[in-house]
């Protein structure tokens, strides 16, 4: 009987050792696997790609717009400006080139990122124009800071060459960049959509491009601007172009 018990205990001990060893190996393997998985997760969290960067940039742009809309210190911004101009007129259908004096004046009113802008320009016996636009500031919190605006409106233009008034729709944009707290650059673009003169079959379209620099002292901005306006005329028989190159010196007051 004792002999039978000893022969039974020995295999039992061996089996127990084997099972224990296998459990230890399994636990070791499971622990190693968890360490590897944790390291991979850490690497994945610190990894970035070009797509991630583009998504982050888009989110930052949306956040900037949200901040401009909801956290601007001054919700209302009002500005008045006036300027003297010197304009060189060149016609493609003749060799006429002359310099004319003129003026510009206007205002802008913005609530947060939404605004209204209006301007009038008169060049002696050459050009008379009134422009009204709706504005949307798509970047920046103020006109007295880096900003980008898009504009859509209408221009009331008296055309001296046709001796007639025309009202084309317009769209465009403006941008301001600061090089220093008191010094900056600005640019603008305006497109005149095609419109017909009422008393003729002539069509008018065109564009205006401007760029310049400014000095800013608190609420006063002194600016210099170069503008080129091109007007295109098209009828059933003829096509022509009138160009106006203007040099502008002006002042703008912010309230």
Image: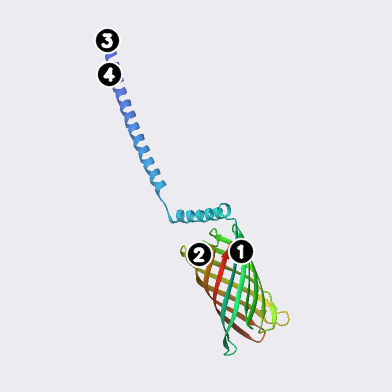
Callout 2 touching callout 1 (CB < 8 Å): no
Q: Which mark sits nearer the N-terminus, 1 or 3?
A: 3
**Disc 4 target residue:** 10
Q: Where is residue 80 in the image (x, y as percent from the top left)?
A: 60, 67
How was this image coloured? Answer: rainbow
- Which residue is at 32% across, 26% downward? 20
Q: Is mark 2 on a helix, strand or loop?
A: strand
Q: Which mark sits nearer the N-terminus, 4 or 1?
A: 4
Q: Say which of marks 2 and 1 sits in front.
A: 2
Q: Position of residue 171 (x, y in %)?
A: 61, 69
Q: Residue furthest bottom?
A: 95
Q: How much space separates mark 4 and mark 1, taking CA atoms?
A: 93 Å
Q: Which mark sits nearer the N-terminus, 2 or 1?
A: 1
Query: Which image quadrant: the N terminus?
Result: top left
Callout 1 touching callout 3 (CB < 8 Å): no
Give 151 or 10, whichever is nearer the viewer: 151
Q: How much space separates mark 2 and mark 3, taking CA atoms?
A: 110 Å
Q: Position of residue 188 (x, y in %)?
A: 55, 70
Q: What element carries label 3?
A: helix
Q: Which mark sits nearer the N-terminus, 4 or 3?
A: 3
**Disc 3 target residue:** 2
Q: Say which of marks 1 and 3 sits in front.
A: 1
User: Does 125 appear above or below 67?
Assistant: below
Q: How much space separates mark 4 and mark 2, taking CA atoms?
A: 99 Å
Give 233 or 156, whichever is nearer the viewer: 156
Q: How much space separates mark 4 and mark 3, taking CA atoms?
A: 13 Å
Callout 4 touching callout 1 (CB < 8 Å): no
Callout 2 touching callout 3 (CB < 8 Å): no
- Which residue is at 27% across, 14% downward? 6
**Disc 1 target residue:** 135
């Amino acid at each position: 009987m004792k002999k039978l018990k000893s022969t039974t205990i020995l295999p039992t001990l061996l089996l127990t050792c084997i099972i224990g060893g296998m459990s230890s190996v399994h636990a070791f393997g499971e622990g190693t696997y968890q360490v590897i998985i944790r390291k991979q997760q850490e690497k994945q969290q610190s990894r970035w790609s070009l797509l991630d960067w583009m998504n982050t940039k888009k989110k930052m742009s949306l956040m900037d717009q949200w901040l401009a809309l909801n956290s601007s210190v001054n919700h209302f911004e009002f500005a008045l400006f006036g300027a003297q101009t010197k304009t060189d007129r060149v016609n493609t259908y003749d060799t006429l080139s002359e310099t004319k004096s003129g003026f510009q004046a206007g205002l802008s009113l913005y609530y947060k990122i939404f605004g209204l802008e209006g301007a009038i320009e008169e060049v002696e016996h050459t050009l008379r124009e009134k422009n009204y636009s709706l504005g949307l500031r798509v970047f920046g919190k103020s006109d007295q800071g880096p900003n980008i605006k898009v504009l859509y409106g209408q221009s009331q233009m008296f055309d001296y060459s046709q001796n007639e008034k025309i009202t084309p729709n317009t769209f465009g944009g403006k941008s301001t960049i600061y090089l220093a707290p008191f010094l900056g650059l600005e640019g603008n673009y305006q497109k005149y959509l095609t419109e017909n003169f009422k008393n003729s079959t002539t069509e008018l379209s065109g564009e205006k491009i401007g760029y310049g620099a400014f000095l800013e002292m608190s609420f006063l901005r002194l600016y210099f601007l170069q503008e080129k306006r091109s007007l295109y005329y098209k009828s059933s028989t003829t096509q022509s172009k009138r160009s106006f190159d203007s040099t502008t010196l002006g002042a703008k007051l912010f309230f």
